[in-house]
Image (tube, rainbow, N blue to C red):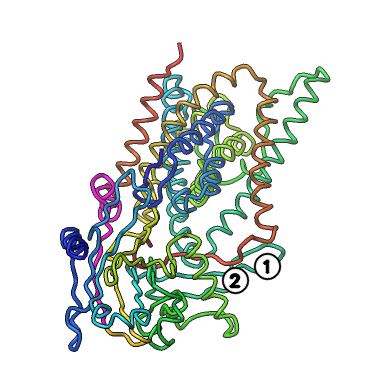
Amino acid sequence: MIRFALLLVVSLLGASVSVAQDEDHSNDLVTALSSDMVSIQSNFTGTEIVIFGQASDIERAPHAAEEFELAIVVEGPPQDITTRRKGRFLGVWVNREAERFQNVPSFYAVASTADIGEIADRTLLDEYGIGLNHINLAVSGVSNVPLSDRDDFRRAFIRLREESDLYSERETSIEFLTETMFRTTIPLPANIPVGDYSVKSFLFNGGELVSHTEETLAVAKIGFEQVTFELAQNYPLVYGVLAVILAIFTGWLAGVIFKKD
Amino acid sequence: MQLYLPIAEIPVNIFVIFAMGGAVGFLSGLFGIGGGFLLTPLLIFSGIPPAVSVATVTTQVVASSASAVVTYWRRKAIDMKLATILLAGGVFGSLIGVILFDVLQSVGQLDLVISLSYVTFLGAIGGLMLFESVRAIRRRKAGATPSARKPGQHNWIHGLPLKVRFRQSKLYVSVIPVVGLGAIIGFLGTILGIGGGFMMVPALIYLLRVPTNIVIGTSLFQILFTMAAATIFHAMGTKTVDIVLAMTLMIGGVIGAQFGARMGQNLRGDQLRLLLALLVLGVGLRFAVDLLLTPEDLYSIAIRKGAGA
């Protein structure tokens, strides 16, 4: 009965319910997002997204429940990001070496039922980009970073992204509601970039990937924020002239209001 | 109250921004300066991306100089011919500034150039002002009267060709230093997010010998239009003018300026200049310390392409 009710919740909330399409295991992993759209308005200070799901495989093999592990990865639209390191030059601290990471996620959050390293072996994690240490950080050909320092740049990049809450790894944050129903909450900070996000869920059994699903989540500015942003991007001249007119008008108005004597 | 900035793409506390605009507006009213050189660093230190800070302050300077220009216009204290030639140089300098701004940003040296320029210009101007105001205060204490400007006093600038007559300023000088001065101020203003009044006013007085009653109005007029051009260039080039941030700063600024102007009337000129000199030096010093001290984090990241670039 509880299970039925939860399924109902999933399907009601299920703005986008997605079903795994594996050949051997049909319908063994079902996931849904609390919302498939995050809208950014003037009062936006961050939000969170809840991911629900059911893994029916676990039910079929109840005694092996411990062997099942889940990982959910939320990824933002790709970016090219330059990481720079300061060094002393003529007594002054300036940016010296730079490494450019290409097509890296602008946002990355992973939730799992266990430590990432225990879910599967390295190659599988690398292949699907599960875990902060397994994201594909491709670098551009041109770089003045010595080979021995490359790892420092990778680590610094991940650390800086973690510090701005854009990358996160939340091990054992997936909560089971029943034996097969699970739920996790991913916080989306106020500085998330807009674009199309993907939410990928992976079900592992004894280190083997048995099923996975993928859903999309749109993060978009709406209303005034959207109009302003699009004006600035698509009609920069109009936007610039508007800003000047607004400034001159404000200044003139203040001059009139506070006119002395 | 948190407000999401559509261009900077971060939420800010609107009251903090409003207070910053008000405080800088107060000082600008007090000293008769634009205040860009204070506002831009304040925004950068408070976490607004440097590119957004610089571009948005140019818009704010338009508003703060517009309200003052109206006053000087009524008093007919603007030399239109001089202002127009300065402006031509200013727009050109501003255009070069935006191009260089883009280049520096892509090679990752924008912050360094901004910091070095602040140290150099604020240090030099602040030092000169400090020296000059201390001397003036000493002289006043000693009871001597400051010597008036002697007519016919010339320097090398007055020997340059292409001379033009500026009737209102009672000047006959070459256009080369006028255009050059406008271009330098426009260039620095665009790169640093400052109006440049604190550099323009002394340059007009000491280099070109423009009468003091015309200097401020003329300088403000040139700053208004150079910064208007800089706003448009930034909007088209770097696309970092945040209209919501600018509006908040403007409202805080114009209100603060009124209180500052009233308080300024109760202080002596040389005391005001001493305070301003210390303020300018302080900001310059803050940048120097950041350049010299070992940074807390040697690494930094910048988005080059894709979402949020």
Which residue sits at x=25%, y=59%? A34
Q: Are marks 1 and 2 in contact (CB under 8 Å)?
A: yes
Q: Is residue B162 visible?
A: no
Question: Which residues lie in the magenta part?
Answer: A211-236
B237, A40: nearer the viewer: A40
Query: Which residue sits furthest top?
Result: A261
Question: Which mark, residue A89?
Answer: 1
Quadrant of the image occupied by residue B208: top right
Sort mark 1 into few (<14), some (14-19) or many (20+) by Cα contacts within 10 Å: few
Q: Residues within 10 Å of mark 2 (few under 14, many from 20)?
A: some
The quarter of the picture where the N terminus of chain A appears is bottom left
Judge left or right: residue B96 versus residue A20.
right
Name which residue type carries label 1: Phe
Identify the residue at horizontal 59%, vertical 40% (top origin): B199
Q: Which residue is mark 2?
A: A96
If you read the primary sequence from the N terminus, does the residue marked by circle 1 or circle 2 appear first?
1
Residue B143: x percent and y percent? 81, 17
Please provide percent x and percent y for residue B130.
72, 35
Q: Residue at x 72, y 30 (%)?
A: B133
Residue A221 in magenta stretch: yes
* Amino acid type indicated by mark 2: Arg
Establish if A97 lies above or below B128: below
In the image, B31: left or right of A203?
right
**Nearer to us in this view, B92 or A92:** A92
Gap in angstroms between the C-alphas marked 1 and 2? 9 Å
| Residue A114, percent from left and from top | 43, 75
- Image quarter hosting the C terminus of chain A: top left
A132 or A152, which is in the foreground?
A132
Tell me: B15 left or right of A51: right
The local secondary structure at tag 2 comes to strand
What secondary structure is found at the residue carrying circle 1? strand
